[in-house]
Image (cartoon, rainbow, N blue to C red):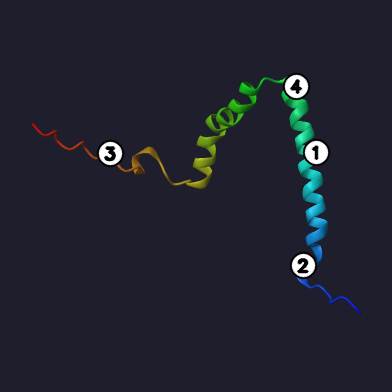
Amino acid sequence: MNAPIEKGLARWSFPIAVALMIVWGVNFSVTKIILYHIPVCAILSLPFFWMRLLGPGLLRSAYPGASRDSLPLPRPAPPSPR
């Protein structure tokens, strides 16, 4: 019997799965090596550092016409019951 001819992305599913497993395995090995040399706290703080550094520039590039004056003003707090 002949196997049916696969069309589209179905024929790429096995090579993609193998590539994903290879990348996942390499990523695990590289992460273990990095964690051996650098403390975990330093690695976990990197995303926060980069967002503090690059975040305002990314926001300005995404919204070029926006300024501090275009932000909505906060509503005043409701009066507290007596």
The secondary element bearing badge 4 is classed as helix
How far apart marks 3 and 4 lie (CA) works out to 47 Å
In this view, the residue farthest toward the left is 82
How far apart marks 3 and 2 lie (CA) works out to 52 Å
Task: Please give the label number shown on residue 10.
Answer: 2
Q: Is residue 76 above or below residue 22?
A: above
Which residue type carries mark 3? Pro
Sequence order check, earlier mark of 1 and 2:
2
* Residue 33 horizontal/vertical position (percent): 78, 26
Sequence order check, earlier mark of 2 and 4:
2
Q: Residue at the spot x=35%, y=44% of the render? A: 70
Task: Please give the label number shown on residue 74.
Answer: 3
Is residue 12 toward the left or the right of residue 1 in the image?
A: left
Which residue type carries mark 2? Ala
Label 4: how many residues lie within 10 Å, few (<14), some (14-19) or many (20+)? few
* Residue 8 lies in quadrant: bottom right
The secondary element bearing badge 1 is classed as helix
Is residue 21 toward the left or the right of residue 3 in the image?
A: left
Q: Which residue is mark 1?
A: 26
Label 2: how many residues lie within 10 Å, few (<14), some (14-19) or many (20+)? few
Quadrant in the picture for the C terminus: top left
Label pair 3/2, CB-CB below 8 angstroms = no
Is residue 75 toward the left or the right of residue 9 in the image?
A: left
Sequence order check, earlier mark of 3 and 2:
2
Label pair 2/4, CB-CB below 8 angstroms = no
Label 3: how many residues lie within 10 Å, few (<14), some (14-19) or many (20+)? few
Nearer to me, 32 or 1: 1
Q: Which residue is mark 4?
A: 36
How far apart marks 1 and 3 lie (CA) works out to 48 Å
Label pair 3/4, CB-CB below 8 angstroms = no
